[in-house]
């Protein structure tokens, strides 16, 4: 059972089959597995750029953010890994680790977490795992297309033979 089902029903639902939506090729959607859940602070886009606490759920294909428990019933926002280019700008201060998630459309989203929490490493490793799975899927798709093209050429040659 998913520990974050109440706030993140789309992340915690058990899906079978189907495909992930988003930029790039579709990947089979395995059942969403919560890798980590907890709290991060996100810098707001407002004029004052205040840090706002967010409940976060990290799964194999996305990072979902929502208001902290009891802090308003806003809808969870999902940052799908297909739309994330990299985790960048890791800086450590005495109390916090600051990091930036860069999206494929070059938008930068700033986060901070307590120094020893390791959220930036968890997100980075999940993103690398996602990108590796996508690369393997792309390779297999190209290989299958090449094999089908070669089989089609061979069949045409055989059809022309006397």
Image (tube, rainbow, N blue to C red):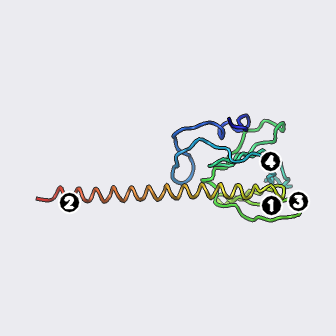
Disc 2: which residue: 157
Q: Residue at x 68, y 60 (%)?
A: 102
Q: Position of residue 162 (x, y in %)?
A: 10, 59
Q: Residue at x 78, y 44 (%)?
A: 55
At mark 2, the secondary structure is helix
> Whole-Å distance between the Cαs marked 2 and 3?
70 Å
> Whole-Å distance between the Cαs marked 1 and 3?
10 Å
Horizontally, residue 99 falls left or right of residue 21, namely right
At mark 1, the secondary structure is strand
> Whole-Å distance between the Cαs marked 2 and 1?
61 Å
Horizontally, residue 144 falls left or right of residue 134, namely left
Q: Residue at x 56, y 58 (%)?
A: 132
Q: Using the rendered view, name the quadrant where residue 65 is placed.
A: top right
At mark 4, the secondary structure is strand
| Tag 1 and tag 4, C-beta contact below 8 Å | no
Horizontally, residue 54 falls left or right of residue 131, namely right
Of circles 1 and 3, the one toward us is: 3
Relative vertical location of residue 34 with respect to residue 95 in this rendering, above or below: above
Disc 3: which residue: 95
Q: Quadrant of the N terminus?
A: top right
Q: Position of residue 116 (x, y in %)?
A: 82, 57
Disc 4: which residue: 39
The tag earlier along the polypeptide, 2 or 3, is 3
| Tag 2 and tag 3, C-beta contact below 8 Å | no
> Whole-Å distance between the Cαs marked 3 and 4?
15 Å
């Amino acid at each position: 059972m998913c520990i974050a089902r109440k706030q993140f029903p789309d992340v915690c639902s058990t899906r079978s089959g189907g495909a992930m939506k988003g930029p790039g090729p579709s990947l089979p959607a395995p059942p969403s597995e919560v890798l980590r859940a907890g709290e991060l602070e996100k810098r707001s886009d407002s004029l004052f750029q205040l840090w706002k606490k967010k409940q976060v759920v990290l799964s194999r294909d996305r990072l979902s953010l929502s208001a902290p428990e009891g802090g308003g019933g806003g809808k969870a926002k999902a940052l799908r890994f297909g739309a994330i280019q990299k985790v960048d700008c890791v800086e450590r201060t005495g109390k916090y680790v600051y990091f930036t998630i860069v999206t494929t459309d070059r938008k930068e989203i700033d986060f901070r977490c307590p120094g020893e929490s390791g959220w930036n490493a968890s997100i980075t490793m999940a993103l690398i795992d996602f990108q590796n799975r996508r690369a393997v899927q792309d390779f297999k798709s190209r290989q299958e297309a090449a094999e089908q093209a070669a089989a089609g050429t061979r069949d045409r040659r055989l059809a022309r033979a006397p």
